Amino acid sequence: MTIVHKDGNIIKNAYGLSKWPLPNSIDNPASVPAEASPQIPIEGISVKDLNTTFFEEVKKIYIQDTNGSILCSLLTMDCKDHSLIHALDGIWRKTYDEGIFHLLDGIIYYRTNHTCVMAVVDRFSNSPIFLPCHKDDKAIETALLIWNTIVSWTGIFTNIISDRDPKFTSALWKTLHQLFGTKLSFSIAYHPNTDGLAERMIQSLEDMARRFCEYGIEFEYCDRFTLDWCTLLPALELAYKTSIQTSTNQTPSILEKGWNPKLPHDSLRKQLAEIHPTAASFKGMLVTARKHAVRLMEYSFTYTNDKWDKSHATPDFKVGDSVLVSPTNFNNIKGCKKLKNSFSGPFVNKALHGEKAIEVQISEEPRNKLPTFPMSWIKPYKSSDAEKFPLRNEVPQVISPIV
């Protein structure tokens, strides 16, 4: 039986030997050498090996390609014999040394250079983008990284919320976004949770990325091609974009694009007439990396929620209760700043302003301060036990006259 594939490949089947069509090769008893054609499997995965002639042609045609871009695109094809690359003459190797190093020894390049991950999150859809970068990047390098990788997909930003990192507070960064019409919103000093939603989202993403990068998985193919955390980072991004968020009850991909992308187990089939070993390993890498990312993401969400709930439980304050106030911004208090107590008081709770703010009666020393403080600066005052600590003096309560 002869099967002609739509790509032009002729498939032969020997009766009684296999129920699947076999390639028209010398290993197939039903093969016809006259009808031999380039090996193209049914699913269109190329398994053609490169030989010395290929590199000789590349050497002649692309000798003037000084930046090595054409060579890098050609070398993405499957090549098992890496000794052919090292056998090239000195002039050709000198021209393309950087391109070959980045392509073949990428694991060394990533491990020795990329030291951090930049997380860019869409405020509306909670869709993240993870960019491996360098911790010591300057403002212009950060701007170029965002321009080359994000702006082509999202366009110019309307508003950017960030902390006060020198990469984002420099004069170059501010001037650049003034030209684009982008507003830069930074968290104020002494109160980093200006934008609580963005801060909590970044904490979850940071914890998830740290676990994935630190306790992640690595793959090494038989042809010495290795994938490390930088290469597997898109699997974490894909897992987050296709997971339902509790705040929106939708996936970030649905809110951003209106549809969920196909996952590896949806588009890759297991039963093929001929599977390249590297393609099978790559498919296994995608599936395993995504499952690993989903497990870490669920653990990270649970850990972040428990930690937040423990440290941000809303206290039940009542008018007239004694409370302590953090003197972080009390610049008019006399004495050494290092010797200040972490909390001052006790003060009397004068009024409650919703669930996020409280008004207290201020003493004479910090009387110029506004008496209303956020709940994060307040904690309840507990008087000492006279039976357990008989020598401890009770702190007098600060009560100022109400005007």
Image: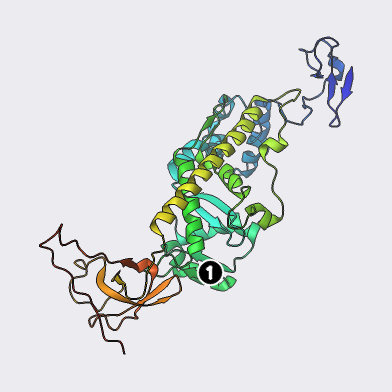
Q: At which x and y percent is residue 358?
A: 38, 74
Q: Mark 1 is on which residue type?
A: Leu
Depth check: give the residue in front, 247 or 43. 247
Coloration mode:
rainbow
Q: Is residue 286 left or right of residue 304?
A: right
Lateral position of residue 342 relative to residue 387, left or right:
right
Residue 294 showing in the rendered view: yes
Residue furthest left as drawn = 391
The residue to which callout 1 is attached is 176
In front here: 190 or 49?
190
Quadrant in which residue 346 is drawn: bottom left
- Left or right of 106, for residue 65: right
Q: Is residue 85 above or below residue 374?
A: above
Where residue 288 sits in the image (x, y, percent)?
58, 34
Residue 149 percent coordinates (x, y): 59, 54
**Residue located at (69% from left, 48% from top):** 260
Q: Residue 211: where, in percent of width, then height?
A: 46, 43
Q: Is residue 283 above or below residue 374?
A: above
Q: Residue furthest bottom?
A: 403
